[in-house]
Image: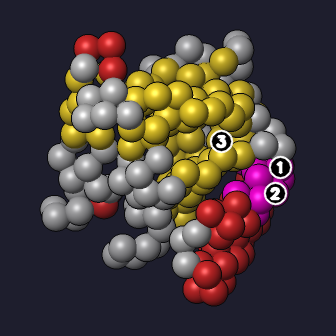
Amino acid sequence: MASDIAERRAQACEKFMTRVHKITAKEGITPSALHAIKKRLVALAEKTDLFPLGDFEMPVAQGRNHPLLVEEGDGHGLYLTIGLPGKEAAPHDHGVWCVNAAVSGQERHTMYRRASDDQVTQVGEVMVAPGNGMAMADHDIHATAVVGSEPAIGLALYGYALTRFPSVVWFHPEFSSVRATASRRLTA
Ligand SMILES: [Fe+2]
């Protein structure tokens, strides 16, 4: 039954979030903590029966985020994300840590580091596909592209809910362009 799945999904998300807090309470937001959280999120995303597509509306275009578990105040936000084939995002820095895992489909994450005020240099690449996730620290920089002909359905955990996001900085090195979106930290 659909309501049964929704209930089991809510319980699984609660359990996951409890684990996240146990990990970060012990060691803070460190590379090893993010790695441990990533493993947990990959395991949650592998429970594909909890995330039937019928429960989540597809994007009209590009992408869409469905809140799964958004904590109060300055807590974390867990979302189901849908990116349509061909969706791309230029290199950007969220200003807050995040962890991604795939339910289905594939999204390529190209990792960069800032080389100068307006330039970034590629330092790696991760394919987020079932069984494989990625984690970023507060000021890591990534670009994303949904690859293949299937939508990329994923889970994303952010240090802050999207409604309370810090400024996101976008890099277009070919134009020596760096632009920051307004922070939602002060208004939320
Ligand atoms: Fe991003």
| Mark 2 element type | helix
What residue lies at 41% left-to-right and 63% top-to-bottom? 160
**Residue at left 40%, top 29%?**
120
Displayed quadrant of residue 57:
top right
The quadrant of the rendering that contains the C terminus is: bottom left
Q: Which mark is residue 154?
A: 3
Q: Which residue is mark 1?
A: 46
For marks 1 and 3 on the same chain, the one whose residue lies earlier in the sequence: 1
Q: CA distance from mark 2 to mark 3?
A: 12 Å
Q: Amino acid at mark 3?
A: Gly
**112 vs 83, nearest the viewer:** 112
- Coordinates of residue 179 in the picture (x, y in percent): 21, 33
Label 2, label 1: how far apart the Cα atoms are: 5 Å
Name the amino acid, label 2. Answer: Ala
- Stretch of the chain drawn in magenta: 38-51
Which residue bears the numbered disc 2? 43
Residue 162 is situated, as x and y percent measured from the top left of the image, at 38, 54
In the displayed structure image, the side of residue 39 where residue 31 appears, left or right: left
Q: Quick one: label 2 or label 3, which is nearer the N terminus?
A: 2
